Amino acid sequence: MLHQNSPGIMPAVKENGCAFMCALYLGEAHFDRHYNTDDVNSIWESAIANGIITGDLNGDGIVAGPKEGRIQSWGALMRHLELPLRIVMRTHAGKPTHLHNPAMGIPPGCFGICAWQFEIVHFVIGTERPVEYDPWYGGSRTVRYGAPQADGLRIFQRIG
């Protein structure tokens, strides 16, 4: 599996692609998908072109500013990746906004993408150390020194 800091990955993904790379990880780990660097870069660019991920909002030529490189719709991203997953819960301000109680953990048969906080917010697969997948090769400082955010869990359920 590639990481957001793997050679050949475009700078915008390196800067803001942790949640995106977690979605790709679910494809590789659980749905027999395989992505190379060209695939990752192309999918990122097409997701921006289709409004699934925010692009260069301030016109400076890079996707690295506030609110840039953010997933606008997890459902749209999963459809774009052709992954049979639907979001069943996203916490916001510590409260669930969909169908699941976060205190129950990740239900069997579901997958979780979790935001951790240290100096920055960083998405990974896992709610405790060691995480299943950290998109930063070598391990991020956020996972090493931070903690999962109370409002940072997204749970996905297989469709069909």
Image (cartoon, rainbow, N blue to C red):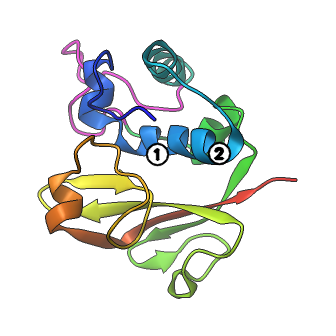
Q: Which residue is mark 2?
A: 75
Say which element carries label 1. Answer: helix
- List x then y, in percent, for residue 80: 65, 30
Q: Find out whether the residues at labels 1 and 2 contact each other: C-beta distance under 8 Å.
A: no
In the rendered image, which quarter is residue 127 located in?
bottom left
Question: Crowding near pointer 2: few (<14 within 10 Å), some, many (20+)?
Answer: some
In the rendered image, which quarter is residue 63 located in?
top left
Q: Which residue corresponds to the image point at 51% horizontal and 42% vertical from the top-left?
A: 25
Q: Which residue is mark 1?
A: 22
Numbered circle sitting on residue 160? none
Name the amino acid type tagged 2.
Answer: Gly
**Which residue is most to the right?**
160
Q: Is residue 57 visible?
A: no
Q: Which residue corresponds to the image point at 48% horizontal and 70% vertical from the top-left?
A: 91
In the rendered image, which quarter is residue 87 located in?
bottom right
- List x then y, in percent, for residue 75: 65, 45
Q: Nearer the viewer, residue 76 or 41?
A: 41
Name the amino acid type tagged 1.
Answer: Cys
Query: Does 57 appear in magenta?
Result: yes
Report the side of 121 relative to 50 (left or right): left
Say which element carries label 2. Answer: helix
Image: magenta residue range: 51-69
Q: Nearer the viewer, residue 59 or 151?
A: 151
Mark with earlier residue (1, 2): 1
Q: Which residue corresponds to the image point at 59% horizontal and 83% vertical from the top-left?
A: 101
Report the side of 8 relative to 48 (left or right): left
Q: Is residue 8 above or below residue 71?
A: above
Report the side of 160 relative to 36 (left or right): right
Report the side of 14 relative to 78 (left or right): left
- List x then y, in percent, for residue 95: 47, 79
